[in-house]
Image (cartoon, rainbow, N blue to C red):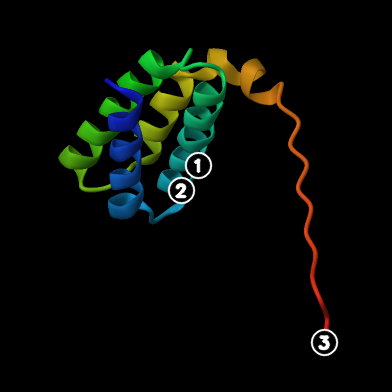
Amino acid sequence: MKAETMIQQYQRLRQQAWSGPASQRILSELGYLLELSRCQGGCYDTELSRQLEVLSCAFSRDGAITTSTTEEIEKALAHLTNAAKAITMVCTAHAHID
């Protein structure tokens, strides 16, 4: 699956299934991994495409993203933990208190 199609599939799932802790958890994790893969030349695209398809099929079948589906996908992608944690993110904010 092309990266653009993967992102469209991810965005569709976010729009349709963003409710409940299991769906928010897995969609946040997959969103991070999609961006990580993009930044690293698409090296995780094949695996992410497979797991997005698993998630999409499970959502169509069950009408929701379940905890068991979330855990199944997390287990399948567990080997990416070190790569995901290797990035240091610095967030900075600025506000006026008027």
Q: Quadrant of residue 2?
A: top left
> Alpha-carbon neighbours of circle 3 within 10 Å: few (<14), some, or many (≥20)?
few
> Considering the numbered disc 3 on the image, is that residue within a helix, a strand or a loop?
loop
Which is nearer the eye, 39 or 88? 39
Residue 31 at x, y = what percent? 48, 37
Q: Which mark is residue 24?
A: 2
For the point 47% across and 50% down, the residue is 21
Judging by the rendered image, the residue that carries numbered circle 1 is: 28
Which is nearer the eye, 22 or 54? 54
Residue contact at pointers 2 and 3, CB within 8 angstroms: no
> Considering the numbered disc 2 on the image, is that residue within a helix, a strand or a loop?
helix
> Alpha-carbon neighbours of circle 1 within 10 Å: few (<14), some, or many (≥20)?
some
Which is nearer the eye, 95 or 74? 95
Q: Amino acid at mark 3?
A: Asp
Mark earlier in primary sequence (3, 1): 1
Residue 87 at x, y = what percent? 71, 26
For the point 78% across and 41% down, the residue is 90
Q: Amino acid at mark 1?
A: Ser
Residue contact at pointers 2 and 1, CB within 8 angstroms: yes
Spatial distance from mark 2 to mark 3, Cα to Cα?
34 Å
Residue 60 at x, y = what percent? 17, 40
> Considering the numbered disc 1 on the image, is that residue within a helix, a strand or a loop?
helix
For the point 27% across and 47% down, the residue is 64
Q: Is residue 70 left or right of residue 53?
A: right
Q: Amino acid at mark 2?
A: Gln
Residue 30 at x, y = what percent? 46, 33
Judging by the rendered image, the residue that carries numbered circle 3 is: 98
- The mark closer to the camera, 2 or 3, is 3
